[in-house]
Image (cartoon, helix red, strand yellow):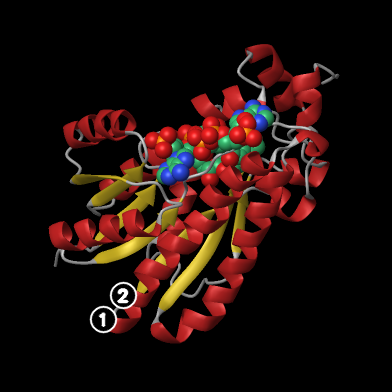
Amino acid sequence: MEKGAAIVTGGGTGLGLAISRELGRRGYPVVIASRKQEHLDAAARTLTGEGIQVLTAVCDVRDREQVKAAVDAAENRFGRVALLVNNAAGNFVVKAEELSPKGWEAVRGIVLDGTWHFSQEVGKRWIAQGQPGSILNIIATYAWTGAAGVVHSVSAKAGVLAMTRSLAMEWGKFGIRVNALAPGIMVTEDAAKNLGYADPAVQALLAKKVPLRRLASTEEVAFLACDLVTDRHPYVTGDCWTVDGGLWLEGFPNLRRFVDGELGE
Ligand SMILES: CCC/C=C/C(=O)SCCNC(=O)CCNC(=O)[C@H](O)C(C)(C)COP(=O)([O-])OP(=O)([O-])OC[C@H]1O[C@@H](n2cnc3c(N)ncnc32)[C@H](O)[C@@H]1OP(=O)([O-])[O-]
Ligand SMILES: NC(=O)C1=CN([C@@H]2O[C@H](COP(=O)(O)OP(=O)(O)OC[C@H]3O[C@@H](n4cnc5c(N)ncnc54)[C@H](OP(=O)(O)O)[C@@H]3O)[C@@H](O)[C@H]2O)C=CC1
């Protein structure tokens, strides 16, 4: 029987693209949803070339109507949505005392509101259809440790972790699993640029802070993400798995120091 589709927000770049590829390899048609047509088109070309069924949906996760339209398009094309990966994010390093209201709003809107919009949209459909489903929310270990320099993202990711546990409790009886995954530091284009570690020398310093002495690859994070969101672990819900080489045990690096050029040995 044909598998239902997997929606991956931010599926055109970085970790989202790696997750889309791995889900495609595991037989799921994928729906990649984000703001920029050029990100989606480039990713769709690559994935299609690898034999993966792809639908693109231009969608700002902050906009409920665009989210609804993306889920409609997924159902129209593939019949049913089986999986949702809330991976889209926005982030930049900023001194908390200098963060503007719109800067706070942008990051909270993408991370917390966006995750909620997609989760509620697919969740209510699964419940009405009497279908099981699985949601995976990509967070970061600073959701529970805190971190300097990214108070907007930390706060939003912590909200997503609380949302994950709450929805798992509320929707478990409908056969809907909801989990989170906290990756370590990955060198993806926008993250490295916005968070101040595009320079390989800074990456090398960061890697020294990781117990496993290297940064994470999107592929290894994607593999675990797909294990968790698909039916490989059907009794896991409301949990957060960490794949960060042990970094959080050492403490999340102070991101303000990157931009201030103070990251020492
Ligand atoms: C390794 C750690 C873990 C990593 C986790 C990740 O999530 S990595 C994921 C990394 N990937 C991504 O982040 C990918 C997507 N990222 C993006 O699209 C943008 O970076 C975005 C998040 C700002 C949202 O864009 P948008 O079009 O919605 O927003 P906009 O351009 O209209 O700005 C809104 C407000 O924010 C302000 N502001 C912006 N930058 C800075 C700054 N550097 N400094 C200070 N402020 C800044 C800007 O000035 C404005 O406020 P104002 O002046 O009106 O009061
Ligand atoms: N990189 C890292 O070290 C870490 C990353 N993470 C998390 O991993 C996930 C992936 O990050 P990563 O791959 O590194 O970064 P990317 O910047 O590559 O991914 C973010 C994605 O979100 C999409 N996006 C941004 N804003 C919106 C919006 N308003 N609506 C819809 N889509 C949007 C972007 O696409 P578009 O521009 O087309 O909208 C992009 O594809 C994020 O949740 C991030 O917080 C967690 C820990 C560490």
Q: Is residue 19 visible?
A: yes
Q: Amino acid at mark 1?
A: Gln
Measured as percent of width and height from the top left, residue 236 is found at: 52, 71
Whether label 1 touches label 2, CB < 8 Å = yes
**Residue name at image x 75 percent, y 21 percent:** 259
Q: Is mark 2 within 8 Å of ligand 2?
A: no
Please give left or right for residue 156 compared with residue 148 in the image. left
Q: Is residue 132 visible?
A: no
Q: How many marks?
A: 2
Q: Amino acid at mark 2?
A: Arg
Measured as percent of width and height from the top left, residue 101 is found at: 68, 43
Q: Quickly name the residue at label 1.
A: 129
Callout 2 secondary element: helix
Above/below status of 88 relative to 203: below
Above/below status of 71 relative to 102: below
View extreme (bottom): residue: 173
Label 2 environment density (alpha carbons within 10 Å; few <14, some 14–19, many ≥20): some
| Image region (quadrant) for ligand 1 | top right
Q: Quickly name the residue at label 2.
A: 125
Q: Nearer the viewer, residue 181 or 150?
A: 150
Indicate the quadrant where residue 123 lies: bottom left
**Residue name at image x 26 percent, y 50 percent:** 30
